[in-house]
Amino acid sequence: MTIRSINAAFDSGNIIVKSIDGAAATLSVRKDKDSDFFQWFHFRVESEAGEAISLKITDLNESAYPGGWSDYNACVSEDRSYWGRAPSSFDANEDGGTLTITYLPMGGISWFAYFAPYSLERHHDLISEAALYEGVTHRTLGYSLEGRPIDCVEMGTGETHVWLYARQHPGESMAEWWMEGALEMLTDPADPHARILREKATIHIVPNCNPDGSFRGHLRTNYAGVNLNREWAEPSAERSPEVLCIRDAMDETGCHWAIDVHGDEAIPAAFIAGFHGIPSWTDEQGARYDVYKARLDARTPDFQRKLGYPEKEAPGSANLSMSTNQLAERFSDAVNGAGKGCVAMTLEMPFKDNHELPDAEQGWSPERSAALARECLAVLAEMV
């Protein structure tokens, strides 16, 4: 038998094995606990080295974002360090929508994932290493429903408060790779933009808002099956303690700039969405948002403004249960002072690739996520 076993009983693992027949396997994705969301997969395959295998993941027409499967190649690694892409194809008419992954393993164990995973162990390493740097402090803002800490790393001495937070949607693991790049830059004493940011701003960083969902292999929800990015208007200890403790901490410090880091399943580009339609919208606040995007677009070809979400919302129509809308409204000019209303942004990176600058071997990758973080923060340093 070419495929000996397929397993997902580990941190962020998710797969259901339907059948194994020689070099082929039929699989499906487990739904988030107490939720109908599913899309994230992460599993390992033991097979004969040097013999091609075929993996079919079925029933994907009912997944959270069926449009994410076209022109998508699954992530694969044999050393769990370098993540490449395995040739994949999607047929909406086969077994309720089937992604077929083909791969020729060099060794006996191959790891497959929707995107390169970012484990909780690596998260704890990231937090511990960052906390050792001079001028960096750590605090636990609260705890998840399963008792995991919501870690926050802080640095800087300026009056402008910047909040960076990621993985409200745990399957969007590129968001924590972005955070790793951000922390590497911000703790580099030789980086000039980091020095400016630490001087002009106080920076609060929450690399993982949803550790329970991350560990459980969820796409979009926490332990209770709750989408945290729809809880910001009225978070509760019973449903969303993760959001409650983060928002409470923001109320204590204030917030002038915020970046909520995500991944988008369907759009093959990195882009930013803002806070159009909030009740207290001002043109000055919107202008700073537009300037930020324009500068980032000019700075790196891995960011663009042509593709993204529609933003022309009627005044007062914004969904205030989403974090960026809530923060832009919560820390408006009336709260922060004239001309200082919070610029809150949702950064989206692709699960697929940057279609204007494709990488056939890796697609969008951990390395490009980390590199984009440095560019995002350099622009922020110019604007604070």
Image (cartoon, helix red, strand yellow):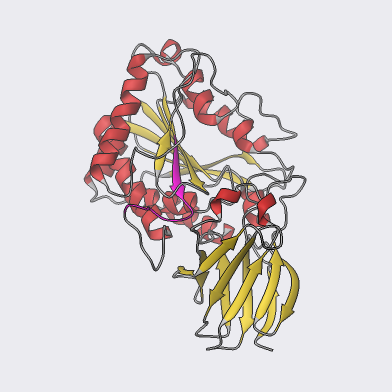
- 51 lies above or below 102: below
Q: Quadrant of residue 282?
A: top left
The answer to which of 384 and 271 lies nearer the viewer is 271
Is 121 displayed left or right of 156 in the figure?
right
* Residue bounds of the magenta highlight: 346-356
- Residue shown at 74% from the left, 70% from the top: 17
Q: Residue furthest front?
A: 93
Is 83 displayed left or right of 214 in the figure?
left
- Residue shown at 75% from the left, 74% from the top: 19
Please state the horizontal and vertical placement of residue 116, each as a whole percent of the image.
51, 61
Please state the horizontal and vertical placement of residue 218, each as a whole percent of the image.
66, 52
60 inside magenta stretch: no
Please state the horizontal and vertical placement of residue 226, each as a whole percent of the image.
70, 39
Q: Is residue 187 visible?
A: no
Q: Total of numbered circles in the picture?
A: 0
352 inside magenta stretch: yes
Q: Quadrant of residue 308?
A: top left
- 252 lies above or below 381: above
Q: Is residue 35 visible?
A: yes
Q: Quadrant of the C terminus?
A: top left
